[in-house]
Image: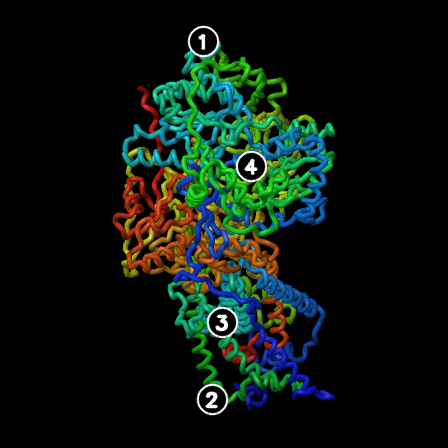
Amino acid sequence: MTKPPDNPDRRSVLQRMAASVALAGAGCTRVPDERIVPYERMPEAGTASLPVYYATAFVRGGFAHGVLVGTKQGRPIKIEGNPTHPSSLGATDVFAQASVLQLWDPDRSPAVVQRGLTASWGAFDTAWRAREAQLLERRGEGLRLLTPRFTSPTLRRQVEALLERFPRARWHRHDPLHVRAADEGARSVFGRVVRGVSHFDRARFVVSLGADPFSEGPACVRNAIDWSARRADDLRADDASRLARLVCAETTRGLFGARADERLVLAPARIDALARRLAAQLYPDLANSGSSAAPTDAADARVLRWAARLKRAGAQALVVAGPLASANTHAIAHLLNLRLGAGGTSVDWIEPPEGDEPAGSIDDLADAMHGGDVDTLLILDGNPVYDAPARSRFADALRRVEFSAHLSLYRDETSEACTWHLPRSHDYEQWSDSRAFDGSVTVLQPAIAPLYDTRSAHELLAVLAADPERDGREIVRATWRGSSGPGEFDARWRRSLRAGTIESSAYLPIVAPHAANRIDPAAAPSSRVEAAPAGVAPASAAGVAPAGAAAVGASTPPAPPAEAAESFVAVFVADASVDDGAFANNAWLQELPRPFTKLTWENAAFIGPGSAVARSLATGDVVRIVAGERALEAPLWVQTGHAEGVVSLPLGYGRRSAGRVGSGLGFDAYALRDGSDAPIRVQLERTGRRHSFAVTQHTIDQHGRALARVVAPGERIDEPVRARPSLYPPIEYPTHAWAMAIDLDACIGCNACTIACQAENNIPVVGAEQVANGREMHWIRVDRYEDDAARTVFQPVPCMHCENAPCEVVCPVGATVHDSEGLNVQVYNRCIGTRFCSNNCPYKVRRFNFLQWVDESVESLKGQRNPDVTVRHRGVMEKCTYCLQRITRARLSAEREGRTIADGEVITACQAVCPTRAIHFGDGNDAKAEVVRVRRSPRHYALLGELNTRPRTTYLARVETPPEHEA
Amino acid sequence: MSTDAGSGRRAPPTSSDAGVLRAGWGYASITDKIADLVLTRPVRWPWLVAFFGTFAGTVVLLGAIGYLFVRGVGIWGVNIPVAWGFAIANVVWWIGIGHAGTFISAVLLLLRQKWRTSINRFAEAMTLFAVAMAGLFPILHLGRPWFFYWIAPYPDKMNLWPNWRSPLVWDFFAIAIYLTVSFLFWYVGLVPDLATLRDRATSRAKRFAYGIFALGWRGEARQWQRFEIAYLLLAGLATPLVVSVHSVISLDFAIGNTPGYHSTIFPPYFVAGALFSGFAMVLTLTIPLRRAFGLYDFITDVHLDHAGKVMLATGWLLAYGYASEIFVAFYSGDEYEISMTVDRWVGFYAPVYWAMMTCNVVLPQLLWFRRVRRSVGMLFALSLVVNLGMWMERVLIVVSSLHRDFLPSSWGLFIPTFWDWTILLGTLAAFAWLFLVFVRVLPSISISEMRLLVRESSERAA
């Protein structure tokens, strides 16, 4: 039948149709037209088998957090800490873990946008050249540069070059979380801005004046590492008297406060007063008049003991002040550290790694813009339209600027208000450099070519400054080439890229001045807002010790105004998950339960329980928070351990153009915020409406059950974990018997494990509504319990991998079974979703795909997924596997090399990320394994061991630091 | 006794008032009465309304099941920790309802209880339909229902077997056997009646249809003899199922370690509850049926009275179960059991608990009074109350035990969604629809057994 018949009959038409359908299926292969050749030296197991790590840094708040970007098949899929980087030592915080999702975020900006229309870099470059000519004529008059805080030496060099080219241009810096009081405090003591670098491994007695060194600032991970390393050593030595003691006065709840041995809950102004009292008690000459030794109330008595203890600790004392503290308090912290001799031991002072503050602030810039003095504005990252001080009316000002360009990762609020939006490359796509908290430099190298048509800030500045070198790598190399020869430089360059830091680039401590013996009264702000205790707060509202301590720094705080009883002091804090708002579109972070509230997907206005009773407000009440002419509506959360008369407002929510994930969640606290560190007075007005939160843990009371345990030093938990009689024959695990031990004493509740697990194991997010339905998917969660004394204990709970696993008995299809090494494995293919296993799991660690959670349609999200871990479809159960894929990888390499798996060779994702090394993992059969050693501790116990589940994951109880022995 | 009962030499017997059968009924009149309900009684509007109403409900159920299969079980309120919700409670409830039918037709047959004769046929139909409804849920509640057959042991290439330690596998057998035996028992009992209908049907189609299912029944003595043996054997097979099926179902819970599940009293306690709710459902169906078809002479107040007594007795067994659970919780000193018990009393689901206690323990005490047992209205109301109470009990066992187990950090709530309710009400509609079809196409009272009763009552009178 070569020739088509003239009159096709029905039969032949059908034949042809059948044939063509068959051929259409058969002929469909996808061999590309181009000639392709295989990789020359193919590794034996193929290129896809092992992850390749690149040492680089994730830059947050301008500071480098050293990371290793783990890539598979060329795709960055998992972030690990860089063991040689000072801010990481192998661990990371939640933000660095989630940064890989930010890289693959489908809402990232892919293209240049001009006034709402897609444009190109070429169009921008042309537009800039036209503008540049005018600007050069005017020597840069009318040109302003706005940057966030950064520590990149290359960027600094480029900014300076730009300012040199346009001498009349001005540079402004804006960081919504910058603590100006800290700079002022340092200046009043040292005569210039310096940064204290704390060494928690050398401190025996730490006083926090409103600070949370475990979650604030660029050194938070390192602080936790240092503290836990020292504590682990001291516990191992079994000498309770050596244990360092942490004490803390704080306004709202922080990780440091949760771990502190004593915690005072005070409004910011009372913390300032407490600081003055502390200083006056220790060094009466610091006070303007003599101090009285008699305590006036319980908190004051506590301060007197702290003072004595600080004195005893001497060089091993450490005082840190937090972001809400006044400049005076920061000054006191520095002074006490100086006088106690802590400099060089528990604290060092260095130059600020971000360099000198540029002359212009964002307020100056806004004034100039309102005044019509700015016609060209270049915004290098940041989101000022969203987070600029409310009084500056930045969005209005921006409308008056003729040419504005905004370089950013997302097309956010600022991008939309500017005439040009320029897409920025992600940190993992670009060459750059950045300093860590201690000044040491990391050269950022790309782990993947830019996904979209983006530029780094360096590449953009090269254009703006007419630098002939446009290549990001060469721009950064130019900064570091210096005077060294090419060969020498290349070797150094490669070394720094391999290690992730440039050798000995950390700042040397500056020598402490001798002159600063007295605090300049002028350094303290003249009027601090005093918290009004509502109803049940201690009687002494005006300060801790009005008689004496107030003499340090400012005079007695002003008496609360008459309406104080009705009003609250509002303080603004960074959100534990979205920080200042930059991470709003990161679904992992949004769904990460906040450490204390276990709240997800939004923020809440926090007040103390006393204030709530006095004003008959309850969690979930929507209130109107009014500050003068500005107001916002927010749902309330009544939090134990929160200062009375204070409402704390987490920043970073109420984003309008964050992306599909982050827009329209929570309330925007920036609407009320002027400076970064000025508490304001607000009224709370009831709206009568109620709001329900999506939380993952509803009760923090242990109900008298011994779950997260606390013991006295040396106390032995006499509860051997042993097998009880069974009808089933005992099962031997001759090769390996994987086991995990979690040290509750080390856990600070930072959540890094949860999000590391999420990244490693392709764990989907489910959204606020499903979290409220109780369907979150985290394989390791951090339970939080609080006892009557408001002491918080965190307890990470992964799968227990029980020897007598209750889940296995009840599965009708045998989809959850033990493997030969004693792991309780879940066979996704076999699971039919009866959920009986979850019902029968006493630890409730199993997670079910109630609906199709995994987004299988968005291409860029697929890039992030770990190819070694099955992506689960709806209808199957899943849970912690002890990172089976990592065990398998270790086994394969051990087998190739003909040896057994060494202790420490398998590191689970949660274990790797943990800053405090709370998680130990290894082979329970190996008598020398660390996990076996840890399990011999007298603090060792099994969670719900009485159920005879014989869990493989066990716990070490937290140790109560003994009360100090008065000398 | 034969199908052409009128052709004997002696005058055919006529019933005397035996309590369970009123006087004056003969073989022919009984046959006329019951067969005409199916063959000649015109379709009237109340039946049509009910038929189309429940049919609409059945269509909604099918739609809801379709949506469930497309989206997944997440459309229900189930979550972690409460991974089982209405679906499992409904299985237990429906199976329990089925138990009364088997009890009436098999156990009471073996015990030679005459009052079972006029109610066993539709009670057994009720069993069949209830078990069919129950059988839906274990499949619907799966995350991946298209693999439901993996629970069954079947030869496959990978030599995979179900996990014999899991009570869900036992469930599969329990429910499958129950459905099979119930169907056989019901069908075998129907054969002589189908032949009667075949012989009396006027249209060819009906004759053909009834003829097919009558399996060539001619009413020979040999056939009767074999029928009697087969029927008795099936009754013997069905009898242990009355106890075993719900005992196995109860093991789904009792095997679990969850406080509120882990209890050795569960098997008898579930069986008692099953009979309790089953007899309530029998009453719920009998009373309207008797009225609609004017069956007052066959289904007398004695029947209702007996059913009331059985409810009272099983209700007390159930109450003993409740008391025992509470006693053991405190006697054991187990903090989790105590906490669970107290939570039932004062926790989030306390209103359900106290409503259940009222429905299942307090109100049924009215059945002590003969006046109540003889009052149709009161009995009907009580039967509804008990059905509701037993359903709440099943929900309570499933949900309240799970929602607060060992770790307070994981406590949560189950709130039923629109789809939970839709599917529950949909099965009620489908059940009612099947029953409405049944009463129109099959004799809802056994003709042959009623004729036997006529002779027995006349002989006793003579």
Query: Foreground: A742 or B369?
Result: A742
Q: Chain of mark 2?
A: B
Q: Residue beneath label 2, please? A: B222
Determine the CA span between mark 3 and mark 4. 77 Å
Compared to residue A717, the image places residue B105 above or below, namely below
Splitting the image into 4 quarters, where does residue A633 fall?
Answer: top right
Q: Amino acid at mark 3?
A: Leu
Q: Residue at x 58, y 73 (%)?
A: A28
Dot 2 surroundings within 10 Å: few (below 14), some, or many (20 or more)? few
Q: Residue beneath label 1, please? A: A290
**Of circles 3 and 4, which is in front?**
4
- Element on which disc 2 rests: helix
Is the same chain shared between marks 4 and 1?
Answer: yes
Image quadrant occupied by the C terminus of chain A: top left
Q: Chain of mark 1?
A: A
- Element on which disc 1 rests: loop
Q: Residue beneath label 4, please? A: A155
**Of circles 4 and 1, which is in front?**
4
Q: Residue beneath label 3, please? A: B179
- Element on which disc 4 rests: helix
Pinpoint residue A763: horizontal percent, then vertical percent.
49, 52
User: Is mark 3 in CB contact (under 8 Å) with mark 2?
Assistant: no
**Of circles 1 and 3, which is in front?**
1
Is the same chain shared between marks 3 and 2?
Answer: yes
Pinpoint residue B421: horizontal percent, then vertical percent.
60, 57
- Sequence-wise, the earlier of marks 4 and 1 is 4
Determine the CA span between mark 4 and mark 1. 50 Å
